[in-house]
Amino acid sequence: MLFENGENMTSEKIIMHIDMDSFFASVEIRDNPDLRDKPVVVCSKTFHLHKDTSRGVISAASYPARKFGLHSAMPLSEAKKLCPDVICLPMNKNLYKQVSDNAVKIIQKYVKTVQQVSIDEAYVLLKDDVKTYEEAAECARKIKSEIAAAERITCTVGIAPNKSVAKIASGYQKPDGLTVVRPEEVLGFLSPLPVTKIPGVGKKTAETFDLLGIQTIGDLAKADKRQIYEKIGRSGMAFQDIANGIDSSQVMETADAKSISRFYSLNPYTNDLTVVKMGAESICEEVHEILIQKKMFFKTITVGIRYADFTTVTKSKSHTVHTSDIFFLKRHAQDMIDELAANNANKKIKQINIGVSNLKKTDVSQMQLTDFF
């Protein structure tokens, strides 16, 4: 469902929540298409594949697995009883982080602020030139489309006036959904939903609400405040605020990054290094602009090339001193592209990534002349 009308709002009042769909399982299925449409779970801790004595905990379940009642935090022993044919896979943390990082880089192209709250979800504050909910929805479609094209996985997006409603909205039409809730639609959207849809309301809190005759968010919105406070305390009052569409928490930039990077997608794919280097020059300028905004110097440059077959090669070089010289960045990035591409001259390139790391803050006295251009 996409709630539509034409109200204008400033970007500060439009918040987006992006949630990757069954993230770990989706990445595994992407890389092993034979698993598609099968009950797949990715497990943390230890487990013994294809044995009745499987031990461990589900970290992610594919949507076919969820039809059997399988879900995150469920013990594997219980999952096996519900679905004897469940396919159990171990965690591949490095792979998931790489895909997550790539998704965040895509998101950053379209928005002003990203607050990544876990490996598979983030709150987003839109750029100042996004003034309406229609424009925000179009931005979300572009993000969804680019993530799907680049990483072959889907995400679901919720757009709303505050973080809590945006998060609830992102869970409304999974998978691959988009739900927009404008200010005047918030109470009507929330009211019929189960109270467990409020972020932070777990099983025990839901049971307490149930004893008070509260099953829906609408019930909670109208409930007696004193009763809520007596039974649940301050958190209960916060839940009731959310039920009434009230949430003043801000989207905060994820804590100081250890690196800054951007990527450039090539369409059509090409092995023409002149074209590739033109793209590289463009993203070097983007990286440099962020360095200036954040008043940071770098010491290390990393270049990655992703080919049409989704294989990736990377190379890093470190300078002896910290700098933010854009000419230095461009020159070394292009040299590394030459080195990486030399071993795969006939393969077509899908994407290039350029990043800087080993960062440190600058002060005005350290700023270089090139930093002002």
Image: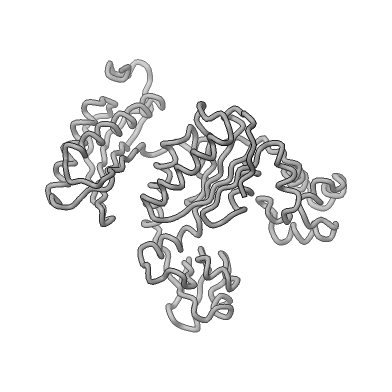
Q: Residue at x 58, y 45 (%)?
A: 158
Q: Quadrant of residue 302?
A: top left
Q: Count all numbered tags in the image, as a single digit.
A: 0
Residue 318 image position (x, y, % from top left): 23, 37
Residue 138 versus residue 64 in the image, above or below: above
Q: Residue furthest front?
A: 5
Query: Looking at the image, which is closer to me, 266 or 199?
Result: 266
Q: Is residue 53 left or right of residue 241?
A: left
Residue 31 image position (x, y, % from top left): 35, 63
Q: Residue at x 80, y 46 (%)?
A: 221
Q: Residue at x 25, y 53 (%)?
A: 308
Can residue 82 be seen in the rendering of this structure?
yes
Q: Residue at x 62, y 28 (%)?
A: 8
Can residue 162 be seen in the rendering of this structure?
no
Q: How is the image coloured?
A: one colour
Query: Looking at the image, which is closer to me, 83 or 361?
Result: 83
Which quarter of the rendered picture does the C terminus lie within?
A: top left
Q: Is residue 265 left or right of residue 118?
A: left
Residue 27 image position (x, y, % from top left): 41, 60
Q: Residue furthest bottom?
A: 52
Query: Looking at the image, which is closer to me, 25 or 91?
Result: 25
Residue 213 image position (x, y, % from top left): 85, 58
Q: Quadrant of residue 356?
A: top left
Q: Quadrant of residue 290?
A: top left
